[in-house]
Protein backbone atom coordinates (compact mmCIF):
# COMPACT_ATOMS: atom_id res chain seq x y z
CA UNK A 1 0.00 0.00 0.00
CA UNK A 2 1.41 3.47 -0.88
CA UNK A 3 2.83 5.36 2.09
CA UNK A 4 0.30 8.28 1.98
CA UNK A 5 -2.59 5.81 1.95
CA UNK A 6 -1.05 3.87 4.85
CA UNK A 7 -0.60 7.07 6.85
CA UNK A 8 -4.17 8.18 6.17
CA UNK A 9 -5.54 4.80 7.21
CA UNK A 10 -3.54 4.77 10.46
CA UNK A 11 -4.67 8.31 11.22
CA UNK A 12 -8.29 7.35 10.64
CA UNK A 13 -7.92 4.35 12.98
CA UNK A 14 -6.52 6.57 15.72
CA UNK A 15 -9.30 9.11 15.18
CA UNK A 16 -11.90 6.34 15.48
CA UNK A 17 -10.59 5.73 19.01
CA UNK A 18 -10.86 9.45 19.74
CA UNK A 19 -14.59 9.55 19.16
CA UNK A 20 -17.03 9.52 22.12
CA UNK A 21 -17.42 5.74 22.02
CA UNK A 22 -16.87 2.99 24.63
CA UNK A 23 -13.71 1.63 22.97
CA UNK A 24 -11.85 4.94 22.91
CA UNK A 25 -9.53 3.68 25.68
CA UNK A 26 -7.86 1.45 23.06
CA UNK A 27 -6.24 4.43 21.29
CA UNK A 28 -2.80 3.09 22.20
CA UNK A 29 -3.28 0.21 19.73
CA UNK A 30 -3.39 2.27 16.49
CA UNK A 31 -0.77 4.60 17.97
CA UNK A 32 1.47 1.56 18.51
CA UNK A 33 1.26 1.06 14.73
CA UNK A 34 1.76 4.73 13.89
CA UNK A 35 4.97 5.21 15.89
CA UNK A 36 7.00 2.47 14.14
CA UNK A 37 5.47 3.42 10.78
CA UNK A 38 6.96 6.90 11.13
CA UNK A 39 10.15 5.65 12.81
CA UNK A 40 10.90 3.23 9.97
CA UNK A 41 11.25 6.05 7.42
CA UNK A 42 14.71 6.14 5.83
CA UNK A 43 15.20 9.88 6.43
CA UNK A 44 13.73 12.58 8.68
CA UNK A 45 12.15 14.14 5.59
CA UNK A 46 10.34 10.89 4.77
CA UNK A 47 9.30 10.57 8.43
CA UNK A 48 7.77 14.05 8.19
CA UNK A 49 5.85 13.01 5.09
CA UNK A 50 4.45 9.95 6.80
CA UNK A 51 3.50 11.98 9.88
CA UNK A 52 1.72 14.55 7.71
CA UNK A 53 -0.66 11.96 6.26
CA UNK A 54 -1.24 10.42 9.68
CA UNK A 55 -2.14 13.85 11.03
CA UNK A 56 -4.36 14.67 8.07
CA UNK A 57 -6.38 11.47 8.54
CA UNK A 58 -6.47 11.83 12.33
CA UNK A 59 -7.78 15.39 12.34
CA UNK A 60 -9.94 14.84 9.27
CA UNK A 61 -12.12 12.18 10.88
CA UNK A 62 -12.01 13.61 14.42
CA UNK A 63 -13.12 17.05 13.22
CA UNK A 64 -15.21 16.25 10.16
CA UNK A 65 -18.12 18.22 11.65
CA UNK A 66 -16.21 21.47 11.11
CA UNK A 67 -16.85 21.02 7.40
CA UNK A 68 -20.61 20.98 8.05
CA UNK A 69 -20.24 24.15 10.13
CA UNK A 70 -18.30 25.97 7.42
CA UNK A 71 -20.82 24.87 4.80
CA UNK A 72 -23.73 26.32 6.76
CA UNK A 73 -21.86 29.50 7.68
CA UNK A 74 -19.98 30.29 4.47
CA UNK A 75 -20.98 27.62 1.96
CA UNK A 76 -17.30 26.67 1.89
CA UNK A 77 -16.89 23.24 3.49
CA UNK A 78 -13.60 22.50 1.62
CA UNK A 79 -11.91 25.24 3.66
CA UNK A 80 -11.71 22.76 6.52
CA UNK A 81 -9.07 20.87 4.54
CA UNK A 82 -6.72 23.77 5.24
CA UNK A 83 -7.05 23.09 8.98
CA UNK A 84 -6.42 19.38 8.53
CA UNK A 85 -3.34 20.12 6.41
CA UNK A 86 -2.07 22.67 8.96
CA UNK A 87 -2.40 20.21 11.84
CA UNK A 88 -0.77 17.52 9.73
CA UNK A 89 2.08 19.91 9.05
CA UNK A 90 2.62 20.51 12.77
CA UNK A 91 2.88 16.74 13.33
CA UNK A 92 5.25 16.52 10.36
CA UNK A 93 7.56 19.14 11.89
CA UNK A 94 7.53 17.29 15.22
CA UNK A 95 8.38 14.02 13.45
CA UNK A 96 11.19 15.64 11.46
CA UNK A 97 12.79 17.05 14.61
CA UNK A 98 12.29 13.86 16.64
CA UNK A 99 13.82 11.60 14.01
CA UNK A 100 16.65 14.03 13.28
CA UNK A 101 18.03 13.81 16.82
CA UNK A 102 17.56 10.05 17.29
CA UNK A 103 19.93 7.36 16.04
CA UNK A 104 17.94 4.15 16.34
CA UNK A 105 14.56 2.85 15.35
CA UNK A 106 13.44 2.08 18.90
CA UNK A 107 14.88 5.42 19.96
CA UNK A 108 12.75 7.11 17.34
CA UNK A 109 9.65 5.36 18.67
CA UNK A 110 10.21 6.79 22.16
CA UNK A 111 11.19 10.23 20.90
CA UNK A 112 8.08 10.40 18.73
CA UNK A 113 5.90 9.33 21.68
CA UNK A 114 7.26 12.11 23.87
CA UNK A 115 7.09 14.63 21.03
CA UNK A 116 3.40 13.76 20.51
CA UNK A 117 2.63 14.89 24.07
CA UNK A 118 4.74 18.03 23.73
CA UNK A 119 2.88 18.88 20.52
CA UNK A 120 -0.46 18.43 22.30
CA UNK A 121 0.75 20.83 25.00
CA UNK A 122 1.77 23.38 22.37
CA UNK A 123 -1.74 23.24 20.90
CA UNK A 124 -2.96 24.89 24.12
CA UNK A 125 -0.77 27.94 23.45
CA UNK A 126 -0.74 30.96 21.16
CA UNK A 127 -3.22 32.63 18.80
CA UNK A 128 -3.81 29.45 16.78
CA UNK A 129 -4.43 27.28 19.87
CA UNK A 130 -6.80 24.41 19.06
CA UNK A 131 -6.32 21.48 21.48
CA UNK A 132 -9.51 19.63 20.56
CA UNK A 133 -8.05 16.17 19.72
CA UNK A 134 -5.98 15.37 22.84
CA UNK A 135 -5.27 11.69 23.48
CA UNK A 136 -5.90 11.89 27.23
CA UNK A 137 -9.63 12.24 26.62
CA UNK A 138 -9.72 8.70 25.23
CA UNK A 139 -9.40 7.42 28.83
CA UNK A 140 -12.83 8.77 29.83
CA UNK A 141 -14.58 5.36 29.66
CA UNK A 142 -12.09 3.99 32.24
CA UNK A 143 -11.22 4.81 35.87
CA UNK A 144 -7.73 5.74 34.63
CA UNK A 145 -9.00 9.19 33.65
CA UNK A 146 -8.98 10.06 37.37
CA UNK A 147 -5.21 10.66 37.14
CA UNK A 148 -6.15 13.99 35.56
CA UNK A 149 -6.24 15.52 39.05
CA UNK A 150 -2.50 14.76 39.26
CA UNK A 151 -1.32 16.06 35.90
CA UNK A 152 -4.30 17.12 33.80
CA UNK A 153 -5.55 15.58 30.60
CA UNK A 154 -1.97 15.54 29.30
CA UNK A 155 -1.01 13.00 31.96
CA UNK A 156 -3.61 10.77 30.33
CA UNK A 157 -1.89 11.42 27.00
CA UNK A 158 1.40 10.29 28.56
CA UNK A 159 -0.20 7.00 29.63
CA UNK A 160 -1.53 6.42 26.09
CA UNK A 161 1.71 7.30 24.30
CA UNK A 162 3.89 5.41 26.81
CA UNK A 163 1.78 2.28 26.35
CA UNK A 164 1.92 2.61 22.56
CA UNK A 165 5.70 3.14 22.61
CA UNK A 166 6.17 0.13 24.90
CA UNK A 167 4.23 -2.13 22.52
CA UNK A 168 6.02 -0.77 19.46
CA UNK A 169 9.40 -1.14 21.20
CA UNK A 170 8.69 -4.78 22.05
CA UNK A 171 7.61 -5.47 18.48
CA UNK A 172 10.71 -3.80 16.99
CA UNK A 173 13.03 -5.70 19.31
CA UNK A 174 11.22 -8.96 18.56
CA UNK A 175 11.90 -8.44 14.88
CA UNK A 176 15.59 -8.64 15.73
CA UNK A 177 15.25 -11.81 17.76
CA UNK A 178 15.19 -10.14 21.18
CA UNK A 179 12.38 -10.42 23.74
CA UNK A 180 12.47 -7.28 25.87
CA UNK A 181 10.03 -7.43 28.78
CA UNK A 182 10.85 -4.23 30.62
CA UNK A 183 8.79 -1.74 28.51
CA UNK A 184 5.71 -3.98 28.41
CA UNK A 185 5.96 -4.61 32.15
CA UNK A 186 6.31 -0.91 32.84
CA UNK A 187 3.23 -0.18 30.73
CA UNK A 188 1.26 -2.84 32.61
CA UNK A 189 2.38 -1.37 35.94
CA UNK A 190 1.43 2.15 34.77
CA UNK A 191 -2.07 0.99 33.78
CA UNK A 192 -2.51 -0.93 37.03
CA UNK A 193 -1.48 2.13 39.02
CA UNK A 194 -3.79 4.44 37.04
CA UNK A 195 -6.75 2.08 37.30
CA UNK A 196 -6.12 1.48 40.98
CA UNK A 197 -5.91 5.20 41.64
CA UNK A 198 -9.14 5.83 39.74
CA UNK A 199 -11.05 3.05 41.50
CA UNK A 200 -10.16 4.47 44.91
CA UNK A 201 -11.44 8.00 44.20
CA UNK A 202 -14.66 8.92 45.96
CA UNK A 203 -16.96 11.95 45.47
CA UNK A 204 -16.27 14.98 47.65
CA UNK A 205 -18.69 16.10 50.33
CA UNK A 206 -20.01 19.60 50.85
CA UNK A 207 -23.19 21.66 51.06
CA UNK A 208 -25.60 21.57 48.11
CA UNK A 209 -26.55 24.59 46.04
CA UNK A 210 -29.88 24.20 44.19
CA UNK A 211 -29.67 25.47 40.60
CA UNK A 212 -32.02 25.52 37.63
CA UNK A 213 -30.16 24.88 34.40
CA UNK A 214 -31.45 25.83 30.96
CA UNK A 215 -31.11 23.91 27.72
CA UNK A 216 -32.41 26.16 24.97
CA UNK A 217 -32.74 25.28 21.29
CA UNK A 218 -32.32 28.50 19.35
CA UNK A 219 -30.85 28.54 15.86
CA UNK A 220 -27.39 30.07 16.29
CA UNK A 221 -27.14 30.94 12.60
CA UNK A 222 -30.56 32.63 12.63
CA UNK A 223 -29.54 34.74 15.61
CA UNK A 224 -26.22 35.67 14.01
CA UNK A 225 -28.05 36.80 10.88
CA UNK A 226 -30.67 38.76 12.84
CA UNK A 227 -33.58 36.47 11.93
CA UNK A 228 -33.98 35.65 15.62
CA UNK A 229 -33.99 38.61 18.00
CA UNK A 230 -32.32 38.45 21.44
CA UNK A 231 -35.59 39.58 23.04
CA UNK A 232 -37.36 36.44 21.79
CA UNK A 233 -34.70 34.25 23.37
CA UNK A 234 -34.78 36.24 26.62
CA UNK A 235 -38.56 36.02 26.97
CA UNK A 236 -38.70 32.25 26.46
CA UNK A 237 -35.78 31.58 28.80
CA UNK A 238 -37.23 33.86 31.47
CA UNK A 239 -40.57 32.05 31.42
CA UNK A 240 -38.84 28.70 31.96
CA UNK A 241 -36.86 30.13 34.90
CA UNK A 242 -39.87 31.05 37.01
CA UNK A 243 -41.44 28.91 39.75
CA UNK A 244 -38.21 27.11 40.54
CA UNK A 245 -37.36 25.59 43.96
CA UNK A 246 -36.70 27.98 46.83
CA UNK A 247 -33.09 29.10 47.10
CA UNK A 248 -32.35 28.00 43.55
CA UNK A 249 -29.90 29.92 41.33
CA UNK A 250 -30.83 30.03 37.66
CA UNK A 251 -28.13 29.40 35.03
CA UNK A 252 -28.49 30.65 31.46
CA UNK A 253 -26.39 29.88 28.38
CA UNK A 254 -23.76 31.91 26.52
CA UNK A 255 -24.91 35.44 25.51
CA UNK A 256 -28.45 34.68 26.68
CA UNK A 257 -28.60 38.36 27.69
CA UNK A 258 -27.55 41.13 25.32
CA UNK A 259 -26.87 44.72 26.33
CA UNK A 260 -26.46 47.81 24.16
CA UNK A 261 -23.54 48.81 26.37
CA UNK A 262 -21.72 47.40 29.41
CA UNK A 263 -23.64 44.87 31.57
CA UNK A 264 -26.20 46.73 33.66
CA UNK A 265 -29.34 46.18 35.71
CA UNK A 266 -31.91 43.98 34.02
CA UNK A 267 -34.97 44.21 36.24
CA UNK A 268 -36.85 41.51 34.33
CA UNK A 269 -34.12 38.92 34.90
CA UNK A 270 -35.46 36.21 37.25
CA UNK A 271 -32.51 36.35 39.63
CA UNK A 272 -30.52 35.43 41.51
CA UNK A 273 -28.66 33.78 38.71
CA UNK A 274 -25.70 33.38 36.38
CA UNK A 275 -25.83 34.12 32.67
CA UNK A 276 -23.72 34.58 29.63
CA UNK A 277 -23.97 38.14 28.29
CA UNK A 278 -22.82 40.03 25.24
CA UNK A 279 -22.76 43.58 24.01
CA UNK A 280 -20.46 46.56 23.51
CA UNK A 281 -18.33 48.08 26.25
CA UNK A 282 -18.10 51.86 25.85
CA UNK A 283 -15.49 52.31 28.55
CA UNK A 284 -12.35 53.61 26.86
CA UNK A 285 -9.09 51.77 27.17
CA UNK A 286 -6.49 54.05 28.86
CA UNK A 287 -3.85 52.76 26.48
CA UNK A 288 -6.06 53.54 23.48
CA UNK A 289 -8.30 56.47 24.46
CA UNK A 290 -9.72 56.86 20.96
CA UNK A 291 -10.56 53.19 20.53
CA UNK A 292 -14.04 52.30 19.29
CA UNK A 293 -16.46 50.47 21.60
CA UNK A 294 -15.25 46.92 22.08
CA UNK A 295 -17.42 43.82 21.93
CA UNK A 296 -17.48 41.50 24.91
CA UNK A 297 -18.57 37.97 25.68
CA UNK A 298 -18.88 37.60 29.43
CA UNK A 299 -20.43 35.72 32.32
CA UNK A 300 -22.22 37.70 35.02
CA UNK A 301 -24.05 37.11 38.28
CA UNK A 302 -27.25 39.04 38.90
CA UNK A 303 -29.13 39.41 42.17
CA UNK A 304 -32.89 39.12 42.71
CA UNK A 305 -33.35 42.68 41.43
CA UNK A 306 -31.41 41.98 38.22
CA UNK A 307 -28.38 44.03 39.32
CA UNK A 308 -24.91 42.95 38.21
CA UNK A 309 -22.95 41.52 41.14
CA UNK A 310 -19.80 40.26 39.38
CA UNK A 311 -18.41 39.74 35.91
CA UNK A 312 -15.66 37.73 34.20
CA UNK A 313 -15.09 37.91 30.44
CA UNK A 314 -14.32 34.99 28.14
CA UNK A 315 -10.69 33.95 28.40
CA UNK A 316 -9.98 32.07 25.19
CA UNK A 317 -11.55 33.43 22.02
CA UNK A 318 -12.32 31.11 19.12
CA UNK A 319 -9.67 31.50 16.38
CA UNK A 320 -11.18 32.90 13.17
CA UNK A 321 -14.53 33.25 14.92
CA UNK A 322 -14.13 35.71 17.78
CA UNK A 323 -10.45 36.47 17.24
CA UNK A 324 -8.59 36.77 13.96
CA UNK A 325 -4.86 36.22 14.59
CA UNK A 326 -2.18 38.58 13.30
CA UNK A 327 -4.65 41.34 12.47
CA UNK A 328 -1.98 44.07 12.04
CA UNK A 329 -0.66 42.10 9.05
CA UNK A 330 -3.66 40.10 7.85
CA UNK A 331 -6.45 42.59 8.68
CA UNK A 332 -6.96 43.75 5.05
CA UNK A 333 -7.25 40.15 3.88
CA UNK A 334 -9.79 39.31 6.60
CA UNK A 335 -11.92 42.33 5.66
CA UNK A 336 -11.71 41.49 1.96
CA UNK A 337 -13.13 38.02 2.71
CA UNK A 338 -15.67 38.86 5.42
CA UNK A 339 -17.15 42.16 4.24
CA UNK A 340 -18.84 40.73 1.09
CA UNK A 341 -20.36 38.03 3.32
CA UNK A 342 -21.88 40.62 5.64
CA UNK A 343 -19.52 39.96 8.56
CA UNK A 344 -17.27 42.39 10.39
CA UNK A 345 -13.91 41.47 11.88
CA UNK A 346 -14.66 41.16 15.63
CA UNK A 347 -12.77 43.30 18.11
CA UNK A 348 -13.15 41.25 21.27
CA UNK A 349 -10.27 41.09 23.70
CA UNK A 350 -9.44 37.91 25.68
CA UNK A 351 -9.57 38.03 29.46
CA UNK A 352 -6.04 37.33 30.69
CA UNK A 353 -7.09 37.02 34.34
CA UNK A 354 -10.35 35.08 34.81
CA UNK A 355 -11.80 35.41 38.31
CA UNK A 356 -14.60 33.55 40.10
CA UNK A 357 -18.05 35.13 40.17
CA UNK A 358 -19.65 35.79 43.55
CA UNK A 359 -23.33 35.46 44.41
CA UNK A 360 -24.88 35.18 47.86
CA UNK A 361 -21.62 34.11 49.46
CA UNK A 362 -20.75 31.41 46.92
CA UNK A 363 -17.83 31.57 44.45
CA UNK A 364 -18.65 30.23 40.98
CA UNK A 365 -15.92 29.38 38.50
CA UNK A 366 -17.74 30.51 35.36
CA UNK A 367 -16.04 30.05 32.01
CA UNK A 368 -17.65 30.42 28.61
CA UNK A 369 -18.06 27.83 25.85
CA UNK A 370 -14.63 27.39 24.18
CA UNK A 371 -12.91 28.15 27.50
CA UNK A 372 -13.83 24.61 28.57
CA UNK A 373 -11.29 23.20 26.10
CA UNK A 374 -8.44 24.89 27.99
CA UNK A 375 -7.63 23.34 31.39
CA UNK A 376 -5.77 26.44 32.58
CA UNK A 377 -9.03 28.42 32.77
CA UNK A 378 -10.84 26.08 35.17
CA UNK A 379 -7.55 25.55 37.00
CA UNK A 380 -7.13 29.29 37.57
CA UNK A 381 -10.69 29.64 38.85
CA UNK A 382 -10.41 26.68 41.25
CA UNK A 383 -7.09 28.04 42.47
CA UNK A 384 -8.85 31.27 43.43
CA UNK A 385 -11.43 29.44 45.52
CA UNK A 386 -14.26 28.68 43.08
CA UNK A 387 -16.53 26.14 44.75
CA UNK A 388 -18.35 24.90 41.65
CA UNK A 389 -17.67 25.26 37.91
CA UNK A 390 -20.32 26.82 35.67
CA UNK A 391 -20.10 26.64 31.89
CA UNK A 392 -22.55 28.80 29.90
CA UNK A 393 -22.12 27.55 26.35
CA UNK A 394 -23.52 27.63 22.83
CA UNK A 395 -23.10 24.34 20.97
CA UNK A 396 -25.50 25.36 18.24
CA UNK A 397 -22.52 25.84 15.92
CA UNK A 398 -21.45 22.20 16.16
CA UNK A 399 -22.65 19.22 14.19
CA UNK A 400 -22.42 15.49 14.80
CA UNK A 401 -20.13 14.29 17.54
CA UNK A 402 -18.57 17.72 18.05
CA UNK A 403 -21.29 18.36 20.64
CA UNK A 404 -20.43 15.26 22.68
CA UNK A 405 -16.69 15.89 22.33
CA UNK A 406 -17.13 19.37 23.79
CA UNK A 407 -19.14 18.04 26.72
CA UNK A 408 -16.63 15.28 27.45
CA UNK A 409 -13.77 17.76 27.63
CA UNK A 410 -15.72 19.65 30.28
CA UNK A 411 -16.07 16.44 32.28
CA UNK A 412 -12.27 16.26 32.54
CA UNK A 413 -12.18 19.85 33.84
CA UNK A 414 -14.32 18.62 36.75
CA UNK A 415 -11.80 15.83 37.46
CA UNK A 416 -8.73 18.08 37.18
CA UNK A 417 -10.12 20.54 39.72
CA UNK A 418 -12.34 18.17 41.77
CA UNK A 419 -15.29 20.48 41.39
CA UNK A 420 -18.83 19.85 40.26
CA UNK A 421 -19.61 21.23 36.81
CA UNK A 422 -22.96 22.81 35.93
CA UNK A 423 -23.58 23.44 32.26
CA UNK A 424 -26.27 25.58 30.58
CA UNK A 425 -26.21 25.39 26.83
CA UNK A 426 -27.89 26.18 23.55
CA UNK A 427 -28.36 23.00 21.49
CA UNK A 428 -25.95 20.81 23.42
CA UNK A 429 -25.59 18.83 26.63
CA UNK A 430 -26.87 20.62 29.75
CA UNK A 431 -26.89 19.43 33.33
CA UNK A 432 -24.56 18.56 36.19
CA UNK A 433 -21.36 16.51 36.42
CA UNK A 434 -19.83 15.55 39.76
CA UNK A 435 -16.22 15.96 40.83
CA UNK A 436 -15.34 12.50 39.45
CA UNK A 437 -16.44 13.64 35.98
CA UNK A 438 -19.55 11.46 36.17
CA UNK A 439 -22.80 12.86 34.68
CA UNK A 440 -25.45 13.14 37.41
CA UNK A 441 -28.35 14.81 35.58
CA UNK A 442 -28.31 15.57 31.86
CA UNK A 443 -30.58 16.69 29.07
CA UNK A 444 -29.08 16.56 25.60
CA UNK A 445 -31.84 16.22 23.01
CA UNK A 446 -35.24 17.58 22.13
CA UNK A 447 -36.59 20.44 20.06
CA UNK A 448 -38.11 22.43 22.93
CA UNK A 449 -36.56 24.50 25.71
CA UNK A 450 -35.92 22.23 28.69
CA UNK A 451 -34.91 22.76 32.31
CA UNK A 452 -33.17 20.71 34.98
CA UNK A 453 -33.17 21.32 38.71
CA UNK A 454 -29.76 20.16 39.93
CA UNK A 455 -28.05 20.21 43.32
CA UNK A 456 -24.26 20.42 42.88
CA UNK A 457 -22.06 20.25 45.95
CA UNK A 458 -19.86 23.20 46.87
CA UNK A 459 -16.31 21.90 47.30
CA UNK A 460 -12.97 23.36 48.35
CA UNK A 461 -9.34 22.28 48.40
CA UNK A 462 -6.84 22.11 45.56
CA UNK A 463 -5.61 19.16 43.53
CA UNK A 464 -2.00 18.55 42.56
CA UNK A 465 -2.92 19.62 39.04
CA UNK A 466 -4.36 22.93 40.25
CA UNK A 467 -1.12 23.55 42.14
CA UNK A 468 1.50 22.52 39.56
CA UNK A 469 -0.33 22.33 36.22
CA UNK A 470 1.06 20.30 33.32
CA UNK A 471 4.57 19.83 34.73
CA UNK A 472 4.18 16.13 35.69
CA UNK A 473 3.07 15.28 32.15
CA UNK A 474 5.74 17.42 30.52
CA UNK A 475 8.54 15.94 32.64
CA UNK A 476 7.45 12.42 31.71
CA UNK A 477 7.17 13.37 28.03
CA UNK A 478 10.68 14.82 28.12
CA UNK A 479 11.81 11.62 29.82
CA UNK A 480 10.54 9.58 26.86
CA UNK A 481 12.34 11.90 24.48
CA UNK A 482 15.55 11.67 26.52
CA UNK A 483 15.35 7.87 26.58
CA UNK A 484 14.87 7.79 22.83
CA UNK A 485 17.71 10.18 22.08
CA UNK A 486 20.19 8.20 24.18
CA UNK A 487 19.43 4.79 22.59
CA UNK A 488 22.57 3.42 20.95
CA UNK A 489 21.76 -0.04 19.53
CA UNK A 490 22.15 -0.80 15.82
CA UNK A 491 19.83 1.31 13.67
CA UNK A 492 18.13 -1.38 11.57
Image (cartoon, rainbow, N blue to C red):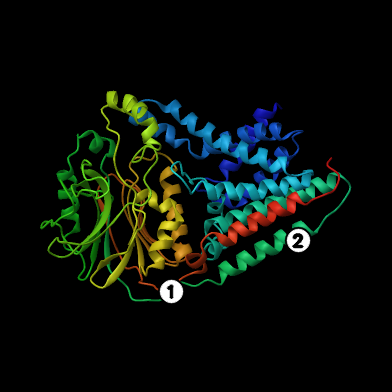
29 or 388: nearer the eye?
Answer: 388
Residue 479 appears left or right of 170: left
Mark 2, residue position: 185
Asked which secondary structure carries label 2, the reply is helix
Q: Can residue 215 be seen by looking at this rendering?
A: no
Please give the label number shown on residue 212.
Answer: none
- Of labels 1 and 2, earlier in sequence is 2
The C terminus, quarter of image: top right
Residue 10 vs residue 467: left or right?
right
Question: Badge 1 local density, few (<14 within 10 Å), some, or many (20+)?
Answer: few
Give the answer, above or below, for where 363 lies relative to 4: below
Q: Are marks 1 and 2 in contact (CB under 8 Å)?
A: no
Residue at image x 64%, y 67%?
193
Give percent across and percent down for residue 337.
34, 25
Tell me: residue 105, above or below residue 7.
below
352 lies left or right of 168 = left
Which numbered tag is attached to residue 461?
A: 1
Q: Measured from the top left, where is residue 190 in percent x and y?
A: 67, 62
Q: Position of residue 233 (x, y in %)?
A: 19, 46
Question: Where does residue 445 sit, x and y in percent of width and height?
Answer: 34, 48
Residue 114 shows in this picture: yes
Amino acid sequence: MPTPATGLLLGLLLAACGLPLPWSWAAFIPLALILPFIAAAATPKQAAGRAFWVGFGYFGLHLWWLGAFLHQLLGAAPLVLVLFALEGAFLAVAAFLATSVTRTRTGRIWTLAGAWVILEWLRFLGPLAFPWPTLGYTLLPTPAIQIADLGGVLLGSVLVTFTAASLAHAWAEGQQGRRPLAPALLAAVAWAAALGYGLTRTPGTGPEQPMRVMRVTFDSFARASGALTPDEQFAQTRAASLDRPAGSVVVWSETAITYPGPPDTRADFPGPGISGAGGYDFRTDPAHPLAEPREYNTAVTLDAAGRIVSRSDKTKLVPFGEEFPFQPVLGPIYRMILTPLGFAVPNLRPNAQPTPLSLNGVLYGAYICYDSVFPRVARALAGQGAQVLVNPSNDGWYKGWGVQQHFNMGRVRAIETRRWLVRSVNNGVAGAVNDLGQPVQLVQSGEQLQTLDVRPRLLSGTTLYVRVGDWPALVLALGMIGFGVTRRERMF
